[in-house]
Amino acid sequence: MSWMHTLGLRWPILQAPMAGAQGVELAVAIAEAGGLGALPAAMLGPEALDAALHDYRARTSRPLNVNAFCHALPAADPDALERWQATLAPYYAEYGLEVPAPPAGPGRRPFDDTACDVLEAHRPAVVSFHFGLPAPALLARVKAWGARVLSSATTVEEARWLEAHGADAIIAQGLEAGGHRGHFLDDDLTTQMGTLALLPQVVEAVDVPVIAAGGIAGPRSVTAARALGAAAVQVGTAFLGCPESTIGALHRQALTSGEARHTALTNLYSGRPARGIVTRLMRELGPMSESAPPFPLATAAVAPLRAAAEDAGCRDFSPLWAGQDTSGCRAIPAAEQLRWLAGQAGL
């Protein structure tokens, strides 16, 4: 029996962790309906993470996946931040905004001993990572309480690396996926493949279970991924329209109204390639800009523009993360959406 069966999941469907777009409520809804719920920890400090885990356990005894980032913190470069603010200066002037002060810190910290201390107190059944894996000592701590470790691979080489360094399962993240790319061995975006090309190659290359992610927006894509050897699928965008997600009204309208057909990879909102609905900022600066400072430093300078525009009912400067296929986004409860994905796929 595989470790995924030992979790007691009714369906081989994982909810993608989506930092900034969900909290405990979505994770609980998915878990109670028979999938694996996820809690994104990338934007949570230790106290907030501890509170979220207490909240989750107060609502359900079902297993949980806690997700963390493993990015390297960028070196301080005031000149790069000034160049980025200068690029955005015309937009500040348009909204009558003052140029914001440089960020005091990176905003999102990678998984470290402090975060591990919090998780160790709660012992989640699954811990997943984006942008590689943490240092061996941290990974050993996670495995010591019996957690299963997942991590995202965007190439066959990354999948082999993750297996060799201790991952219990590989999330094969196709180019269609919304949000941040999980690449960590190479920044060359020409190495990135779609899910249907990447998935069977990863299944062939590794001996651990492979989870398909990217473009899994409806029952047919679930069936296709399973036919190509996926032990499970990970779904994100299709849950964003559910009332349990925490996205704003403008983002929700774009997804559920059928408007969101054009997405692109952009580094404008965080400094690292991530897929979202094309916005004015992406059109006018180009979705990928050399002016953007490295992840996660780009975010702070865009934040005032986002707030001002959203107050005016405009999404020109909002990071509207979404995968290439938004057709499955529906304004229905997450449990119902999960049952539709699983039932119509014949799981």
Image: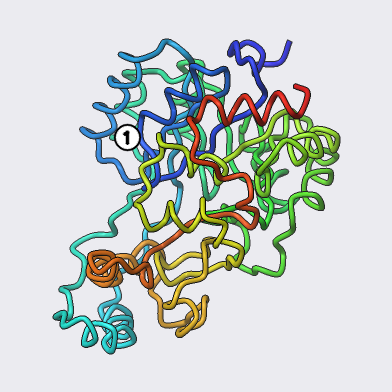
List the single residue furthest toward the front. 257
**Occupied quadrant, residue 293:** bottom left
Apparent side of residue 240 relative to residue 173 in the rendered image (left or right): left
Write the residue at 77% across / 50% down: 198
- Judging depth in this view, the residue of 94 and 74 nearest the camera is 94
Numbered circles on residues, count: 1
Q: What is the quadrant of the C terminus in the image?
A: top right
- Judging depth in this view, the residue of 20 and 181 nearest the camera is 20
Apparent side of residue 123 relative to residue 153 in the rendered image (left or right): left
Question: Judging from the image, what secondary structure is the residue with disc 1 in?
Answer: helix
- Judging depth in this view, the residue of 26 and 158 nearest the camera is 26
In the rendered image, the vertical position of residue 233 relative to residue 347, given as above or below? below
Residue for badge 1: 115
Q: How is the image coloured?
A: rainbow
Q: What is the quadrant of the N terminus in the image?
A: top right
Apparent side of residue 2 relative to residue 145 in the rendered image (left or right): right
In the rendered image, the vertical position of residue 60 relative to residue 26, given as above or below? above
Write the residue at 33% across / 49% down: 109
Residue 306, image x, y percentages: 29, 67
**Occupied quadrant, residue 167:** top right
Residue 186, image x, y percentages: 62, 63
Residue 279, image x, y percentages: 46, 72
Write the residue at 20% across / 72% down: 102
Q: Report crowding for label 1: few under 14, some 14 to 19, many 20 or more residues within 10 A (C-alpha).
A: many
In the rendered image, the vertical position of residue 289 relative to residue 8, given as above or below? below
Apparent side of residue 201 relative to residue 247 in the rendered image (left or right): right
Write the residue at 49% across / 40% down: 331
Looking at the rendered structure, the kind of residue marked 1 is Ala
